[in-house]
Every structure is written in C-alpha cells, then in structure tokens.
C-alpha cells in the first residue's frame, strides 16, 4: 500500500491521510460489521468487471462527448445515482435479486421513484 501511494504522490500529508483512512477501514472494522476476508474471492476480475459495468452504463467515463461532466459535483451525483440504482433497483442475472436484497438491506426491488424519494 505504501509503495502504491508513494508512486503516485510525493506529498507526505496526502500519503498520511490515505494511510490513516486505510487503517480505519481495516479488517477489525469490517469484521465488526459481519464482513470477513475470503482469500478465495480475491481477484482483479471482480474489480475489472465492476469498472466495465460502470463505463458501459455511465457514458461519462468512456470519452469526452456531450455526456461528460463539466463539474465535479455533477460527476459525483451521477456516480452516486448509478451505484444506488445498481444495488437497489437492478435485478442481477446471477443473483436473481438486487444486491441490496441479497445483503439483507431491503426486502423488495426499489422503483426509480422510491430511489429518488429516499435521498
């Protein structure tokens, strides 16, 4: 982790802030929430597939077209809305339910109106 961060920035304040945040989200905090690391599920293919889905659904990430975000706040809002839709409204083929339902966060598939009303 330290090697990755130092490759991208020489700013020690930024590096320390990132390391402190990583320590906050360490295995003890995750275990307290019921998440346990499974080494057999560690794979870059999961991250790559997630990135592909994001790029395919949000055209803002493919190239500079008329769909790009001129302001960072607009980009953040678009990504937040996509992530909420992906987890609460979209039924996944492999799960046959939404990820939120699979995780026990909700008991039904949310409509777009319900998603917008929840904010």
Image: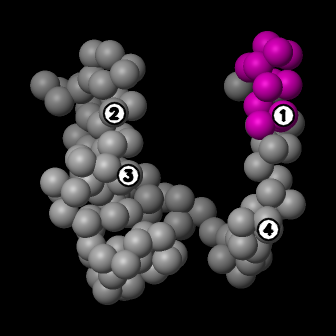
Marks 3 and 4: which is nearer the front? 4
Which residue is under mark 2?
Answer: 77
Q: Is residue 86 magenta?
A: no
| Disc assigned to residue 31 | 4
Q: Is residue 107 above or below residue 44?
A: below
Pointer 2 and pointer 1: residues touching (CB < 8 Å)? Answer: no
The alpha-carbon separation of the residues under discs 1 and 3 comes to 25 Å
Report the magenta residues as a range: 9-21
Instruction: Pinpoint residue 101: horizontal percent, then vertical percent.
Output: 41, 77
The alpha-carbon separation of the residues under discs 2 and 3 comes to 10 Å
The alpha-carbon separation of the residues under discs 3 and 4 comes to 23 Å
Instruction: Pinpoint residue 16: horizontal percent, then vertical percent.
Output: 85, 25
Instruction: Pinpoint residue 33: horizontal percent, then vertical percent.
Output: 72, 66
Q: Quadrant of residue 77?
A: top left
| Disc assigned to residue 20 | 1
Image point (37%, 78%), residue name = 107
Pointer 2 and pointer 3: residues touching (CB < 8 Å)? Answer: no
Query: Disc 4 or 1, which lies upstream in sequence?
Result: 1
- Between 19 and 112, the residue placed more toward the observer is 112
Q: Check the picture and name the quadrant holding the N terminus.
A: top right
Which residue is under mark 3?
Answer: 83
Query: Disc 2 or 1, which lies upstream in sequence?
Result: 1
Q: Is residue 25 left or right of residue 114?
A: right
Image point (66%, 77%), residue name = 41
Pointer 1 and pointer 3: residues touching (CB < 8 Å)? Answer: no
């Amino acid at each position: 982790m330290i090697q990755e961060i130092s490759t991208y920035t020489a700013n020690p304040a930024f590096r320390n802030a990132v390391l402190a945040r990583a320590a906050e989200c360490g295995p003890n905090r995750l275990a307290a929430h019921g998440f346990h690391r499974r080494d057999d599920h560690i794979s870059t293919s999961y991250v790559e597939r997630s990135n592909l889905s994001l790029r395919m659904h949000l055209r803002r990430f493919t190239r500079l077209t008329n769909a790009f975000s001129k302001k960072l706040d607009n980009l953040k809002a678009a990504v937040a809305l996509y992530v909420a839709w992906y987890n609460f409204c979209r039924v996944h083929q492999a799960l046959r339910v939404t990820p939120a339902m699979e995780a026990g966060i909700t008991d039904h598939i949310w409509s777009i109106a319900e998603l917008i009303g929840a904010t």
